[in-house]
Image (cartoon, rainbow, N blue to C red):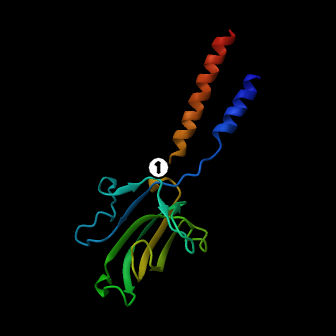
Amino acid sequence: MTVFSIIIVLINFYSIKQIQALSCFKCMTTDFENDFCTDPFNPIDNRLEYECQATIHGKNGLFPARFCVKISGIVVDTGPNLNRSLIHKSLYLRTCITENIMDSTRSLDSTGHFRLKNFAGIDGEVKMQGTITLCTMDGCNRARLFHRDVFLILSLFCFLIVYQKINH
């Protein structure tokens, strides 16, 4: 087998993707006086959930997340089951989801009026004015794939050095 064929086999083997979920920060405004989920965001005060999993509408169980989401805004109205004292309060929610809730906009962020119904710990309905942002990298600010690519390049480089020493 030639060096070229070995490299091709290694690249193909290495590029097989594993099913992995994203790692996403998970927090929600629960204390309006001392909100750790608000911006500016401090990751030290919040939990990064590795291999984050979420539900899929109509299915039982948890599934690997495809998106991290940040929802921020002002509550403009609540459903009948929620405390109306939430109106005019700033609400922040960071979590993971399996489905693109922004399909209709073809964008990963949207600003305006929106409604959250039974979403990530909110029992009932909240109408908000604010921003929804999706991302597809770990923690919405770093990605694991970069490290995989560096490892591949270094592995191939070491292999070529060893191969050169053996053949010369």
Q: Tell me what residue is drawn at x 59 percent, y 72 percent.
A: 105
Query: Which residue is situated farthest in the top direction here?
Result: 168
Q: Position of residue 118 (x, y in %)?
A: 44, 78
Q: Tell me what residue is drawn at x 50 percent, y 55 percent.
A: 22
Q: Is residue 163 above or below residue 41?
A: above
Q: Position of residue 119 (x, y in %)?
A: 45, 75
The local crowd at label 1, few if under 14, some if 14 to 19, many if 20 or more residues have their Cα within 10 Å, is: few
Q: Quadrant of residue 155?
A: top right
Q: Tell me what residue is drawn at x 63 percent, y 38 percent.
A: 14
Location of the C terminus (image quadrant): top right
According to the picture, the residue beneath numbered tag 1 turns out to be: 142
Q: Position of residue 106 (x, y in %)?
A: 61, 69
Q: Is residue 98 above or below residue 127?
A: above
Number of callouts in the render?
1
Residue 127 vs residue 9, the one in the foreground: 9
- Asked if residue 66 lies left or right of residue 75, the reply is right
